[in-house]
Image (cartoon, helix red, strand yellow):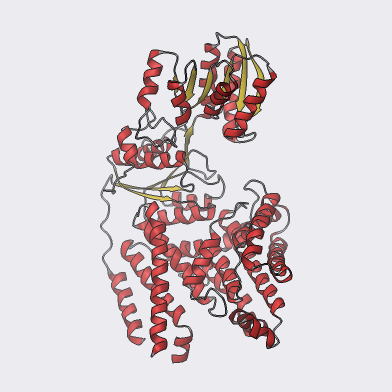
Amino acid sequence: MKGLVRKHGWSLGLGLLFLLLLAVTRLIQPTFGASGFESLARAALPFAFATAGMAIVVIVGGIDLSVASMMAVAAVLAAVLMERIAGVPALFIVLAAGLVMGLVNGALIVLTRVPDIVVTLAMLFVWEGVALLILETPGGAASDWLEAGIRGFFPVEGIPQALLIIVVAIGAVWLPVRRSKLGLSIYATGSDERAAFRSGVAVGRTKIAAYGLCGLFCAMGGLSLAALTGIGEPVPGPYLLASVAAVVLGGVVLGGGRGGLLGPIIAVFILRIIRTILTLMAVDPNVTTIIEGTIMVAVVMLGTWLTMRGARR
Amino acid sequence: MKKLLTGAAALAMAVSLAPAGFAGGHKSYTIGVSNTVQGNGWREQMICAMRAQALVEGDVTNLIVAHRNTDSAGQLEDLNNLIEAGVDAIVLNPSNPDALNSALEAAMAQDIVVVAVDAGVTAEGAYILSNNQEEYAYLGAKWLFEQLGGSGDVVYMRGIAGVSADTDRDNGFKRALAEYPDINVVHEVFTGWQQDQGKQQMFDFLATGIPFDGVWTSGIDNVIVDAFVESGAPLVPIVGADNAGFVQYLSEVDGLQGAAVTNPGSVGGAGIALAVDILNGEAPESATVLVDPVLWENTTEAGRATIEAAQNPNLDPEWPVSVTIPGWTDYSMEEIIACEGPGDS
């Protein structure tokens, strides 16, 4: 029990913070209940997938600035395909496209030896252009079942379907990876690339795989955008900086090797509910972003301080 | 650890047992606003007009503004948050006509009045209020044709092909053209609503030496005046929009005869007024309401006085110059410049 608490201390702390913020929300708006939580989970969907992808590449020691653009490609691809062919094959084509985009990012980084931040910055523009080539103006149509699939509760009232999708989709991809040799290689590469290489880890392949996983999650993010809006929008949304913020707040060390996906996902919900609270309180919109940023820095500082104090004992 | 968990549980219980908020009395409306472009002069004027109008509407006690740069998914999040906040009406500038229907339908299912301003939404039951773009073009074109004495050659500088505002304006222009059979369009171009592009197009056309008597522009206006002045060509009557730069030229450039047609961002204030009317049971007959523009010209004494009065040194230079809409908005120029809504202090 004690070991578990120590291992997941950061996530546990974030979970408590989220419950506290839920309580604050109820205090401000007593009618905030299951339906409010449901729309919160729906709003968190694209952010959660972008954050999961970003967390994996940060753990492997990189960063992917093209997440929002890959999501835009996936969203327009989904909207265009689903208008023309059946939804299920379209879904798998989009997921495959996401995986390929991620693998391309990773391969370019490993093969050219150009820093991650430069390659993915360039790919940000490339994928943005691809999205515009697929669909010049917002349009297309997502399948009805996809739109309906993220709404409501399942299996019981109180658990939003969107939350279930986040947990199942990310869990189904990440847990097997985490427990396999690849997972170990990802953490080893992120914490010390040279040491990992000397221990026999195929560093290059590990990186490419990590970027591939990021692309896969971005495809899921794009699908959730199509599901939310019912159409595809070729212009990337605000998911790049939001995902970096959630990754940092979620306890993943920028630089790699440490952290998991649970913390960042909870962090996504924290950042979403802060916006809900600020809207409920009718805070001046020009001030909200300042508050959001301040809270983030404060939480990370407090967490680091607590961790350091704990380590000294 | 255990202590912490107990504490959190106690807090959660205390919160759920807290008394429900005081119920709002009759006619104390809360209105939510959603907008997805921040930092653009037209949109900022729209937001300030919404605040100012909400302040002068006696029945509005609270205005919640969700105003940031985001995509349609972000606007959906904001709309859902506004629904959670228990607003009586939502006034929004939609990012896309189709993408927001899920939240707008959820809002209307809870009897929340939905008013889209500036652009339309396809959700059934939503009210749409926007500037009448056909009338915008008709008004300016008619003034220009009258100025030319009903006969002459004009240059027709449009916006972007295929955009609904441009199509509507083209219909209005053609309507005026039909009324003046001796007016002839010698040159028709799309400026793309780009300043530099429009200016270059005018330079190019002036260089051809083809004579013409007037210019109608779809809002790329002050750079057209610049093109005349810089190439030394004699000025002809020019029609533009109520952009600060052009309106200033109308009162300052020697020999310029021109007219500015209003395309105000204060249509947002009209949206708030419409939402309050609907809440008070005075819904308009049609779900689509068009706001008619007005024309300011500098060829008569009265026109020059109007332009003079509209210019206010405190006005943001990025804003359209017309800050009020006759028949719709009730606030003063000071109130929209202050940009304060109910609840702000």
B263 left or right of A69 in image? left
Classify residue B245 as left or right of residue A196.
left
Q: Nearer the viewer, residue B138 or B337?
A: B337
Question: From the viewer's perspective, is residue B54 above or below residue B219?
Answer: below
How many labels, in total? Answer: 0
Quadrant hosting residue B84? bottom left
Q: Which residue is depicted at the point 27% across and 52% down?
A: B24
Residue A122 appears left or right of B323: right
Pinpoint residue B186: horizontal percent, then vertical percent.
Answer: 67, 18
Q: Residue at x 55, y 73 (%)?
A: A167
B285 or B139, nearer to the observer? B139
Question: Residue B43 location, x and y as percent?
Answer: 45, 41
Where in the figure is residue B307, as x and y percent of width and height? 40, 22
Q: Position of residue B152 (x, y in %)?
A: 61, 11
Q: Is residue B196 visible?
A: yes
Q: Nearer the viewer, residue A45 or A307?
A: A307
Question: Is any part of residue A156 visible from this angle?
Answer: no
Compared with A279, B270 (above or below) is above
Quadrant location of the N terminus of chain B in the rendered image? bottom left
Relative vertical location of residue B23 with respect to residue A265 in this rendering, above or below: above
